[in-house]
Each structure stands twice: as C-alpha cells, then as structure tokens.
Image (cartoon, rainbow, N blue to C red):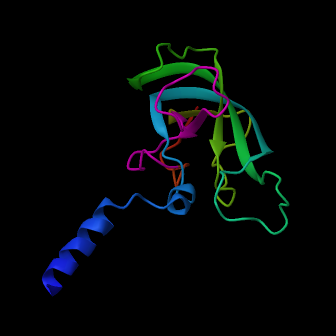
Amino acid sequence: MKRTRRFVLLVIILLMPPLPSSQASSPYNYHTYLVAVIEAYVTNIRLVEVPAMPTCVPSPAGGGRDRMEWVQKISLKILKVEKMELNRTGSDIYPGDIIEVTNQFLDQKPPFSPGETIRVRVRLVLPEERYHPQDPRQQWWFFPPGEAESFHPRRPFIGIQAVR
C-alpha cells in the first residue's frame, strides 16, 4: 500500500505542469540568426536606456511601470565581411551597412574607441523562434568563441583584434 502511494505521488509530480512563476522568472532564450566575422569601423559608443527584461518579481519603486536599464550601444560601419558562419535571415550584411552592437555588461569596457577599425565576430539574436527583420527586439552582440548561444555573452570583448 505504501509503495502504491509513492508511485501515485511520483506520477502526479511528473505530470504536473510547471508553475507560471517559475517560467516568468527564467531569462529569455535568444535564438541566433546570423553569425559573421567582420572588419568594421567604430563610429560611436554610447549609453542608452532600454526596457528591462520582464520578470515576475514586483519592483517596490516600479508602481506598475516598466523597468528600464542602461546598456552600451556600439555603432559599427562594416568595411568587409570576412566570413559568414550562419545566416538564417534570408538577407546578407554588406560593406557600408551600419550595425549597432549591444553590450549588457557595463563593467566591461571595450578595448577600442570611436575612430578605430576592428576585426570581430558578431551575431544577430532575437528572443523569437521566427525571424522578422523589423522586430525591434533583435540585437547584435559580439560573439567570442566559446560563449553560450542562448544568452548574452559574458565576456563580449574577448577575441577582438585591432586592424591597422
């Protein structure tokens, strides 16, 4: 009898749907749509305020408003596309295009400044499984080898080379 109760309890736990609060607090799983190695001219580095990722934790100061957070936006003018490692967008990036790379980790300063030319690996991400070119949530990130594909790169400036 005791063994039957344990089995029933185990089946109930395994079949129980996940709690909504546990899903709401998990971070977005970003999907990669393009990975390329480019040579680019750094045109601008600036701080901008963007909406923070939604969580289930209420903010005492929020009062129902969306939270905002600061991120660094680095504008790059593409001079040369050296290698396209992945492209699921249906379009290409070309020399002359300007992309804006997002750096979430403000404690890590870029090893370059505006006016310099760099060689870097970048990726285009979106928190959706389908790519929509006009989706405002799409972001470019620096993508050093060894970084996890689902989240923000923890060490975005590793592997960036200055071009003289």
User: Which residue does the image show at 73% across and 65% down from the upper left?
Assistant: 58
Percent across and percent down for residue 94 are 55, 14
- Asked if the stretch drawn in magenta spans residue 149, the answer is yes
- Up-down: is 59 above or below 69? below
Q: Does residue 58 appear left or right of residue 79 in this picture? A: right
Q: Residue at x 42, y 22 (%)?
A: 87
In front: 23, or 103?
23
Q: Is residue 11 above or below residue 93?
A: below
User: Does the magenta run of residues contain 143?
Assistant: yes
Where, quadrant-wise, is the C terminus in this rendering?
A: top right
Q: Residue at x 54, y 49 (%)?
A: 156
Indicate left or right for 140 with 66 as reference: left
The relative height of residue 6 versus residue 72 in the rendered view (above or below) is below
- Say left or right for 155 vs 136: left
- Asked where in the image residue 4 lies, by quadrant, the reply is bottom left
Where does the image place residue 71, in percent across and percent down from the top left? 72, 49
Q: Residue at x 71, y 40 (%)?
A: 73
Residue 148: image location, x then y, percent: 41, 50
Residue 49 in the image, given as x and y percentages of width and height: 80, 46
Image-quadrant location for residue 74: top right
- Region of the chain picked out in magenta, as a range: 125-151
